[in-house]
Image (spheres, rainbow, N blue to C red):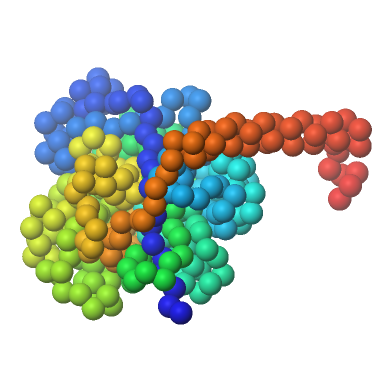
């Protein structure tokens, strides 16, 4: 029996704090007109001190699960964009939502990461190794932004989006995917310091090497070229023509990039789902956030042919085709109440486990050198 991977749940999260172009004009030499004309961005969301990539990812994940007929314990795999080198952000999400049977790992492919993650989850479902997966794109790029650099600080915002994927024998869902990379462009979009090549020092901090570095013109040329080529390739693999595509949901990086890609594809801009003006570039979160809003507004309908396409640092790029199938489910009020209770119980369980480890540390000692 042929297995298909369907998107059955979706959710998004964005910080409450809004940073407008006028706010930025008080920080650097810029203006609302200058930013809007060059990027299409009017405002972006900025994480508060108590928020992080992990907290946004958890919120988006819980909202995605709320729209499905499964619970967190039914999830077999969690894939998330990274926050730490270790532990993985995915493991933090696993703990906070109570996905007790899930494997969890982070995937680093910059702004293309969500496409990579959805494809990997879909492939695992098709092979029969898992039944349900949770893929999350989450970023707090404001923490890595140089707020004195007007060329980059105007672009980025924070947010998260999540998809639940489930196995089904019903045709449709994720169909094809193109994943590509070119490491020769590593310096075009990067966060230079903080790894093994440039460990954190006073010098790297003083030189702001822990903030996003970008060569804008080169990135623009790269992005417009690969978004069009990846879209064509993914559409061809699906056996479609470009005219068969209902919606293109692009990485929300820059309005000029999206318009240029649309012209390269000879597709009307009206076929592109765009919410860039209100969120800015949220990196790997931008595609799921745009998809969630299109679903909430009723733009995406049963049977629609979608293309998700993105690009990012690495360099990476990719495109994914899917046939949207409306999930067949009815979620009762009592089921929703049970989920709220389950989330509370999960948090209590996590607290008890952490407390137990502290008590064990007191009893047995905490010096790692004594036991390794």
Q: Locate residue 368: give its quadrant.
A: top right
> Taking 318 as reference, is 106 above or below it?
above
Q: Residue at x 20, y 37 (%)?
A: 277
Residue 25 shows in the view: no
In the picture, measured across the screen, residue 216 lies left or right of residue 100, that is left
Residue 205 location (% of width, % of height): 50, 35
Counting every numbered tag in the picture gives: 0
Name the foreground residue: 10 vs 333. Answer: 333
Lateral position of residue 207 relative to residue 349, left or right: left
| Residue placed most toward the observer, 327 or 298 | 327
Residue 306 percent location from the top left of the image: 24, 61
Q: Using residue 72 as the reference point, say whether residue 323 is left or right of it.
A: left
Which residue is located at x 15 percent, y 69 percent?
A: 244
Residue placed at 23% from the left, 72% from the top? 235
- Against 333, is 104 above or below? below
Q: Residue at x 19, y 49 (%)?
A: 299
From this view, report whether residue 126 is shown above or below residue 142. below
Choose top left, top right, bottom left or bottom right for residue 38.
Answer: top left
* Residue 186 position in % (x across, y down): 40, 59
Residue 23 appears anywhere in the view: yes
* Front residue (pair 9, 116): 9
Q: Position of residue 276 (x, y in %)?
A: 22, 42
Q: Is residue 334 left or right of residue 323?
A: right
């Amino acid at each position: 029996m042929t297995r298909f991977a369907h998107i059955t749940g979706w959710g998004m999260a964005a910080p409450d704090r809004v940073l407008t172009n006028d706010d930025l004009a008080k920080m650097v030499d810029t203006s609302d007109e200058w930013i809007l004309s060059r990027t299409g961005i009017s405002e972006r969301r900025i994480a508060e001190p108590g928020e992080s990539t992990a907290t946004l990812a958890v919120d988006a994940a819980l909202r995605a699960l709320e729209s499905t007929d499964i619970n967190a314990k039914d999830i077999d795999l969690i894939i998330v964009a990274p926050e730490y080198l270790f532990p993985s952000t995915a493991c933090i999400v696993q703990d906070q939502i109570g996905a007790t049977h899930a494997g969890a790992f982070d995937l680093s492919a910059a702004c293309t990461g969500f496409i990579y993650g959805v494809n990997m989850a879909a492939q695992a479902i098709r092979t029969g190794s898992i039944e349900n997966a949770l893929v999350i794109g989450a970023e707090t790029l404001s923490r890595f932004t140089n707020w004195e650099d007007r060329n980059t600080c105007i672009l980025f915002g924070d947010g998260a989006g999540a998809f639940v994927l489930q196995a089904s024998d019903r045709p449709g869902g994720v169909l094809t995917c193109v994943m590509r990379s070119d490491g020769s462009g590593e310096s075009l979009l990067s966060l230079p310091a903080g790894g093994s090549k440039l460990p954190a020092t006073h010098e790297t901090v003083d030189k702001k090497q822990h903030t996003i570095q970008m060569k804008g013109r080169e990135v623009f040329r790269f992005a417009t070229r690969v978004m069009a080529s990846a879209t064509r390739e993914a559409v061809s693999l699906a056996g479609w023509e470009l005219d068969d595509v209902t919606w293109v949901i692009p990485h929300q990086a820059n309005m000029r990039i999206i318009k240029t890609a649309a012209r390269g594809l000879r597709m009307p801009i009206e076929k592109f789902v765009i919410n860039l003006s209100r969120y800015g570039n949220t990196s790997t979160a931008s595609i799921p956030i745009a998809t969630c809003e299109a679903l909430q507004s009723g733009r995406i309908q049963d049977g629609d042919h979608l293309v998700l396409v993105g690009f990012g640092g690495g360099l990476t790029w990719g495109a994914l085709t899917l046939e949207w199938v409306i999930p067949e489910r009815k979620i009762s009020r009592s089921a929703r109440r049970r989920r709220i209770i389950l989330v509370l119980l999960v948090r209590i369980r996590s607290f008890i486990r952490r407390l137990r480890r502290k008590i064990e540390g007191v009893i047995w000692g905490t010096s790692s050198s004594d036991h390794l």
